[in-house]
């Protein structure tokens, strides 16, 4: 009837959407081919930046395009003044924020943002910390943003104590936040190192953390985040020393030992005795780097005549304080 808007049927709507998708795909494919050709031809210009911007705005996970943009910026930096590059990088950060709004968990966008700031003449790291706060308000479990945050705070020289308070706040608001629990495992050894054991956390602090994680269990016993952190807490105890692997070889003539914990062998250090077929053997210990420092892997250099016989040989390594030992067999050879 006259004066009434014609309503499209479902079939007509689907056909219109199909044509629209084909049109967009054709434009996207054409722009992609154009970009790859420009990169192949070594063209690092503003047109390439514009084309990649159009594509990345629709698909921020197109990693090859981020690589191309970095190549363009490096090429421009060779002939442009510092202030111009500062302005260009600032615009790139604004563009990246629009990409992150499309996909806040885009690997390429977060990585490229860190690269841009590392190449800016005057980066504003404190602003980046604030940006991380903002995105973790949107999604407190965005582990891409948590990874980027660790990178940013190291550049901004934010103190670990401040970051631990931030982790406290995030966990208090939501115990189901694995990234924040994981962050604590990196911060605590820096803030509360055990003076008697390198890499360990003080026992009283571990007990406090244990109480915190128990509260998370009572709040939501089915959530896995707190249980993973609980496993980390229980794993802070030192592993007992042992010889994980003992190997003997003829060419070159040597014995290789791998320990469960770092150890220092040799004169004036942990005594280690080697026997072959029950006979004590003399030689020189060194770690895998040729140094006399604590290490997991140790190599025993000895006289080549020890394994001169082609028969099999029974090798035994024993240490004192800690007292551990292990045996192996060198098979008969040619």
Image (tube, rainbow, N blue to C red):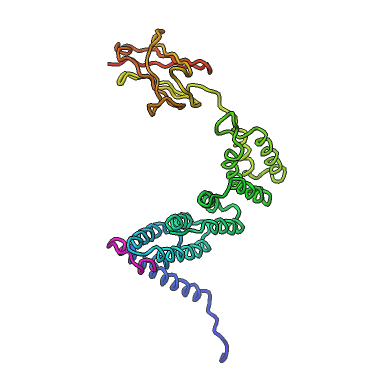
Magenta span dominant secondary structure:
helix
Say if 251 sits above or below 100 in the image.
above
Say if 302 sits above or below 60 in the image.
above
Taking depth in this image into account, of 224 and 12 the one nearest to the observer is: 224
Q: Position of residue 228 (x, y in %)?
A: 60, 40
Placement of the C terminus among the 4 image quadrants = top left
Asked if residue 39 lies in the magenta stretch, the reply is: yes
Residue at 50% from the left image edge and 26% from the top image edge: 260
How many numbered discs, if any? 0
Q: Position of residue 233 (x, y in %)?
A: 62, 36
Say if 108 sits above or below 11 in the image.
above
Give the residues drawn in magenta, as a range: 36-50
Q: In the visual, does 16 lie left or right of 310?
A: right
Q: Residue furthest bottom?
A: 2
Asked if residue 95 lies in the magenta stretch, the reply is: no
Residue at 56% from the left image edge and 55% from the top image edge: 129
Taking depth in this image into account, of 105 and 270 the one nearest to the observer is: 270
Q: Position of residue 8 (x, y in %)?
A: 53, 79
Taking depth in this image into account, of 163 and 178 the one nearest to the observer is: 163
Placement of the N terminus among the 4 image quadrants = bottom right
Q: Position of residue 7 (x, y in %)?
A: 55, 81
Residue at 38% from the left image edge and 69% from the top image edge: 26
**Residue 226, located in which quarter of the rendered image?**
top right
Residue at 58% from the left image edge and 38% from the top image edge: 189
């Amino acid at each position: 009837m006259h004066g009434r808007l014609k309503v499209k049927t479902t079939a007509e709507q689907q056909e219109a959407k199909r044509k629209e998708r084909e049109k967009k795909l054709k434009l996207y494919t054409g722009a992609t081919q154009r970009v790859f050709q420009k990169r192949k031809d070594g063209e690092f210009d503003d047109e390439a930046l514009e084309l990649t911007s159009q594509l990345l705005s629709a698909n921020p996970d197109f990693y090859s395009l981020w690589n191309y943009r970095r190549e363009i910026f490096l090429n421009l930096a060779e002939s442009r003044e510092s202030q111009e590059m500062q302005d260009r990088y600032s615009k790139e950060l604004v563009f990246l924020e629009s990409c992150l709004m499309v996909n806040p968990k885009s690997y390429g966008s977060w990585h490229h943002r860190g690269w841009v700031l590392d190449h800016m003449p005057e980066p504003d790291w404190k602003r980046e910390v604030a940006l991380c706060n903002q995105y973790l308000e949107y999604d407190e479990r965005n582990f891409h943003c948590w990874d980027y945050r660790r990178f940013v705070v190291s550049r901004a020289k934010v103190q670990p104590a401040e970051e631990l308070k931030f982790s406290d706040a995030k966990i208090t608001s939501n115990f189901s936040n694995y990234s924040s629990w994981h962050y604590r495992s990196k911060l605590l050894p820096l803030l509360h190192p055990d003076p008697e054991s390198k890499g360990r956390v003080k026992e009283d602090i571990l007990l406090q953390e244990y109480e915190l994680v128990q509260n998370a269990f009572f709040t939501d016993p089915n959530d896995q985040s707190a249980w993973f952190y609980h496993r980390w807490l229980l794993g802070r105890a030192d592993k007992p020393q042992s010889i994980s692997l003992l190997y003997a070889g003829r060419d070159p003539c040597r014995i290789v030992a791998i320990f469960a914990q770092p150890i220092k062998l040799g004169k004036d250090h942990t005594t280690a005795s080697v026997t072959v077929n029950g006979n004590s053997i003399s030689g020189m210990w060194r770690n895998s780097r040729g140094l006399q420092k604590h290490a997991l892997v140790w190599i025993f250099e000895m006289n080549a005549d020890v394994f001169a016989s082609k028969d099999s040989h029974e090798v035994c390594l024993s240490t004192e304080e800690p007292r551990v030992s292990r045996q192996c067999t060198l098979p008969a050879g040619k």
